Image: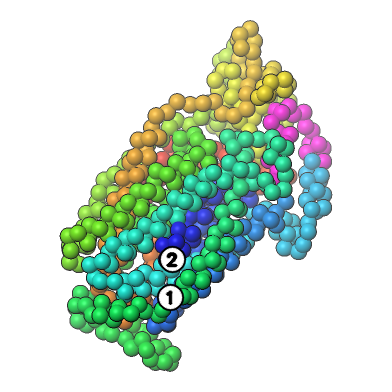
């Protein structure tokens, strides 16, 4: 039941990061805040729950947590049902613009009237009038509830397992339980990747009426389906958890073990059967017993640095693959899940079985964990691998004079999407709809390529008479462009995924052994509380800052932001500097 709960409760957020940014006009810092809100609520709940709930019926508390997690997942999906139908810019792919400032004002007014017409209730009205990005607060609240609901699972649940199995069997059981927390994201990545190939408003509009495909950068997949399914499954799990006893018969004999606490002064037991008042008086004693234990503190700090990287990478690895190797969001999610997550599962299992096989004592396990950390550090430079960015005219290469093919004097390597060839088009930067010209160059849109006509007689329409393409093409292929970026050849992705596989594997090989050590070096009466305090540090110093650090560095590599036509505000990032992203990603991980 615990493993199934871990499978269900993990992996429904990170897969949707880039999709949520596009759907609700969020930047990486905002999406990172959504991700870490889960950990924030975990921190607030874990200390109180693990101290006062250590002598309660722990399986029942896990069941209550599962119910709360289900409510949080349902809240997390609400923005889809409260927001208007996704507008990807139906008129943009034509690439033909002669819009005047008055036309722009007209379009903005029409959009506003249409939005007001679709308001159905107060929360929708409040959020929509202040912008789609304010749905971030609904997503955040859902994450807070999910963090509260998952707290008993990762603290009381694991302590319950360790208390009810033998010392030598504990690493195997804990390894299997931890593996489930990794399998959850794998299922989330794979199923989420498939769901992202479904259109976001599939429940509101006909698929045939959607004029874009998953390869289009404006595409938004059905991110909301997974949270709804998770909510239903979490509520079903409440029943089996409530049927478990407070402790399994005969487990009291298994708990009579030799103390492995650093020194006897740190082995002070706390009377957990005392009343509430007595427990409150003993709280500071229990806390300082743990905080003065050097083995416990150093092991926790080591886990913080590890979890900072794990959380940061897991939040943005799909986005990094998407932008550094020029693949679609759904494919990058599938690659991240199918290749990287099994490495985490294997690492947990190998770590648990290794400790069980060699029957290591506590110092030997700690040395093993340190050795694995050095191996991961040695592999980190491999994260710098990336493909060259798509050569988009106006971003990475200047516009060319369409008459003689030489560099246009108005163009430069600085970002400049306007040129003499499209100066009369009044092109918009709000929507990114790249086209591949017959000259092998990618343009921001058909409009930015200077195209004045669109041939719709073919299955895949083609832009024609594109003034920004060299005139030498007139007598050959013609000055045409097709939707989508030009294809690039790069064989580095398999090597990158292999190195990432090894890094993830060796990272998680040490996770279960470190958990075993934590449960061995604290007094019996403080096991649950010890896990709670450790998780407090792990979340506060590792899991929470991780996505912020990675998200901030990724945003710093943005070359071109979405710009709202009406008010000029910035939305999500359209184009990143893949080289800068790779360097920063490697540096932080190292």
Q: Is residue 356 above or below residue 204?
A: below
Q: Nearer the viewer, residue 472 or 139?
A: 139
On screen, 477 above or below 208? above
Left-right relation of 501 to 97: left
Q: Quadrant of the N terminus?
A: bottom left
Name the residue: 82% across, 52% down.
117
* Tag 1 near tag 2, CB within 8 Å: yes
Label 1 vs label 2: CA separation?
10 Å
Kindly identify which numbered label has been placed on residue 579: none
Q: Position of residue 229 (x, y in %)?
A: 57, 57
Q: Which residue is mark 1?
A: 244
Give the extent of the magenta segment. 85-106
Which one is earlier in the sequence, the residue at label 1 or at label 2? 2
Does the segment drawn in magenta span residue 91? yes
Q: Position of residue 219 (x, y in %)?
A: 62, 40
Of 89 and 515, nearer the camera is: 515
Toward which corner of the image does residue 477 lie, by quadrant? top right
Please tell me which residue is depicted at 82% across the width and 49% down the height of the picture.
113
- In the image, residue 191 lies in the stretch drawn in magenta: no
Q: Residues within 10 Å of mark 2 (few under 14, many from 20)?
A: some
Q: Position of residue 426 (x, y in %)?
A: 72, 31
The residue indicated by pointer 2 is 1
Vertical comparison of 499 with 443: above or below: below
């Amino acid at each position: 039941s615990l493993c199934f709960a871990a499978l269900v409760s993990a992996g429904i957020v990170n897969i949707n990061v880039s999709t949520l940014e596009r759907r609700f006009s969020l930047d990486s810092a905002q999406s990172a805040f959504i991700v870490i809100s889960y950990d924030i609520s975990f921190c607030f709940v874990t200390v109180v729950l693990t101290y006062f709930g250590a002598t309660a019926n722990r399986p029942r508390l896990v069941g209550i947590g599962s119910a709360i997690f289900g409510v949080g997942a349902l809240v997390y999906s609400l923005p889809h049902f409260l927001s208007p139908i996704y507008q990807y810019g139906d008129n943009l792919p034509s690439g033909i613009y002669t819009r005047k400032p008055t036309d722009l004002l007209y379009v903005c007014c029409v959009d506003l009237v249409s939005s007001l017409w679709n308001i159905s209730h107060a929360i929708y009205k409040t959020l929509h009038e202040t912008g789609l990005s304010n749905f971030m607060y609904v997503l955040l609240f859902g994450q807070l509830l999910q963090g509260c609901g998952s707290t008993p699972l990762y603290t009381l649940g694991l302590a319950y397992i360790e208390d009810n199995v033998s010392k030598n069997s504990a690493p195997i059981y804990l390894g299997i339980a931890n593996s489930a927390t990794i399998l959850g994201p794998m299922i989330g990545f794979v199923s989420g990747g498939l769901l992202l190939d479904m259109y976001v408003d599939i429940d509101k509009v006909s698929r045939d009426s959607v004029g874009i495909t998953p390869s289009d950068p404006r595409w938004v997949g059905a991110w909301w389906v997974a949270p709804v399914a998770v909510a239903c499954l979490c509520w079903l799990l409440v029943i089996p958890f409530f049927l478990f006893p407070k402790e399994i018969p005969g487990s009291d004999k298994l708990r009579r073990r030799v103390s492995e606490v650093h020194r006897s002064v740190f082995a002070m037991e706390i009377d957990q059967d005392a009343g509430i008042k007595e427990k409150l008086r003993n709280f500071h004693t229990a806390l300082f017993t743990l905080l003065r234990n050097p083995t416990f503190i150093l092991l926790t700090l080591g886990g913080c640095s590890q979890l900072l990287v794990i959380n940061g990478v897991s939040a943005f690895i799909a986005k990094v693959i998407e932008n550094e190797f020029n693949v679609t969001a759904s494919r990058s999610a599938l690659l991240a899940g199918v290749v990287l997550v099994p490495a985490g599962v294997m690492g947990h299992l190998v770590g648990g079985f290794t400790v069980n096989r060699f029957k290591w004592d506590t110092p030997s396990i700690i040395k093993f964990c340190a050795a694995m950390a050095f191996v991961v550090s040695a592999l980190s430079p491999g994260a710098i691998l990336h493909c060259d960015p798509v050569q988009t005219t106006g971003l990475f290469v200047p516009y060319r004079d369409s008459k003689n093919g030489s560099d246009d004097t108005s163009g430069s390597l600085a970002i400049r999407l306007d040129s003499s060839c499209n100066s009369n088009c009044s092109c918009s930067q709000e929507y990114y709809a790249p086209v591949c010209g017959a000259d092998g160059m990618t343009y921001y849109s058909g409009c930015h390529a200077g195209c004045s006509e669109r041939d719709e007689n073919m299955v895949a329409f083609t832009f024609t008479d594109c003034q920004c393409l060299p005139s030498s093409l007139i007598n050959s292929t013609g000055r045409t462009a097709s939707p989508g970026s030009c294809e690039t050849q790069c064989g580095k992705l398999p090597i990158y995924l292999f190195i990432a596989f090894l890094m993830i594997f060796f990272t998680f090989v040490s996770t279960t052994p470190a958990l075993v050590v934590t449960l061995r070096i604290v007094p019996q009466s403080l096991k649950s509380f010890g896990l709670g305090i450790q998780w407090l540090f792990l979340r506060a110093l590792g899991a929470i800052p991780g996505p912020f650090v990675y998200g901030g560095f990724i945003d710093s590599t943005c070359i071109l932001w979405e710009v709202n036509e009406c008010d000029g505000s910035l939305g999500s990032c359209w184009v990143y500097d893949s080289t800068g992203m790779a360097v920063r990603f490697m540096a932080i991980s190292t």
